[in-house]
Image (tube, helix red, strand yellow):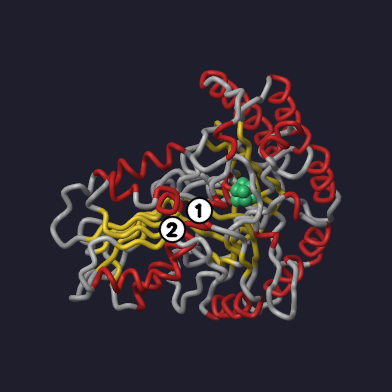
Amino acid sequence: MGKAFDVGIDVLAGGSTAGTAPARASDMEPAMQGSGDSAGAAKSFYIETFGCQMNAHDSERVAGVLLARGYRAATTAAEADLMLYNTCSIREKAAQKVFSRLGEYRYAPKGKVIGVLGCLAQQEGEEIFERAPWVSLVCGSASYRKLPELVEQLESGGRRVMGLDLDTDETFETEITRRDNPFRAYLTIIEGCNYACSYCVVPHTRGPERSRHSDAVLSEARRLAEAGYKEIQLLGQTVNSYRDPSARGLNFAALLREVAAIDGIRRVRFTTSHPNDFTREIVEAIDDTPELCEHIHLPVQSGSTPILRAMRRTYTREEYLQKISWLRGARKDFSLTTDVIVGFPGETEADFEETITLLDTVGYDGVFSFMYSPRPNTSASSLVGAVPEEGKKRRLAILQERQRQIQLCRNETLIGREFEVLVDSHHAARGQWAGRTASNRVVNFVSERENLLGEFVFVKVTRAGPNSLVGEQIS
Ligand code: SF4
């Protein structure tokens, strides 16, 4: 999966990451979906996902739509009748990667349908048919409600079908959502974005902000708990801008408390927050509620107020740091992660130094850092003062090295501490288990037990690296 608007710039494909905390450390790699039973005569599908967690979850929902229509999940892309790419266009590299991947299907067997979904589909539209005439379906992320209808047109012989509406005022609801992680479920609470950051394509590709009704969110969360999920991650490009459109009118902090109160849910996380809508009330809700995890991903993008203004981020360095001070003053020991863009047009050495000093001041536990790349349909693409590529690369390397040192120092202070970890993977060759703390730190450990997947265990930290911790299971 991949990285970059507020969800993402943090989450965009094509950038470089330093840090461990957000579940997007491997977002550069496409996520595969479609593993399943390959027997039977029903048509099969396979989805390859690029980009952020929102995209990953959209793929789960698209899979749900197809399963409900009688499709089955193929084990490999090669055997699927319908091959879908859920794309990211937030970084130039991510877009190039999709076209190069599509090129591999130029000579796909007759009858195989190739479709492009997501941000690149919205961004490029009909152009995709021009560049890759073997593609039959193009559907933007704001038009997924139309997918069943588009699939039906394909089934009845349509050669090129397209869904690119942006005027949607509803969210993409599905009766079935297929979920690929057995322990952590994604749950979208808000789609689109009403901000207008000058470098970002998301308002163009995903449309204006639409919050889901709180009763729909809560009933989905209850169903997830009943299905055995222990951790829920609430998603949205600006998740904390949530405003319940129903008569209850819950704000984000109130919704967090209600999701956390559902029986069976042990952990609730959310991403990505916009600093402008990050309130004390959110910090208080997390501080008061054991189920709400003490990790905040708060994209800053730059430590320089003039650059923030050019990015149209709607806050200053000082306002951002004030929100950080609320988190540092909380009872829980929050871990903080962020996104940074280096080499934005007009960024001077002094501006860049402001970003470096911000890293020192905040003490992040992880930073997703990227070199600025101009994207079509963004106002920043016409800004003067481009920073030469060599200069961007140098700044990125300096920033990543500084952040590596910060993370190492912070993680070393955790040696000797005990954490509750939700175990989510096993590395057979190393004989190690791995899981995440509530603060979203990765801990690797050994255990005598045979199967710990999905269990909560206590681990004492014995060693620390910049990106993860090593420990011993104590119970
Ligand atoms: S425009 Fe919206 S999605 Fe894009 S970076 Fe800004 S707040 Fe995030």
Question: Whole-percent x and y of residue 398?
Answer: 61, 23
Callout 1: few (<14), some (14-19), or many (20+) C-alpha neighbours within 10 Å? Answer: many
Q: Who is closer to the viewer here, 161 or 27? A: 161
Kind of residue sitting beneath label 2: Gly
Task: List the single residue furthest toward the left.
Answer: 110
Callout 2: few (<14), some (14-19), or many (20+) C-alpha neighbours within 10 Å? Answer: many
Image disc number at residue 205:
1
Q: Who is closer to the viewer here, 248 or 454? A: 248
Question: Whole-percent x and y of residue 176?
Answer: 44, 77
Helix, strand or loop at disc 1?
helix
What residue did someone put label 2 on? 140
The residue shown at (62%, 40%) is 198
The residue shown at (70%, 60%) is 241
Asked whether mark 2 and ligand 1 are closer than 8 Å, the reply comes as: no
Q: Are marks 1 and 2 in contact (CB under 8 Å)?
A: yes
Q: Is residue 16 left or right of residue 77?
A: right
As measured in the structure, the alpha-carbon distance from the residue carrying label 1 to the one carrying label 2 is 7 Å
Q: Is residue 221 left or right of residue 291?
A: left
Helix, strand or loop at disc 2?
loop
Reply above or below: 370 against 121: above
Kind of residue sitting beneath label 1: Thr
Reply above or below: 368 against 32: above
Q: Quadrant of the C terminus?
A: bottom right
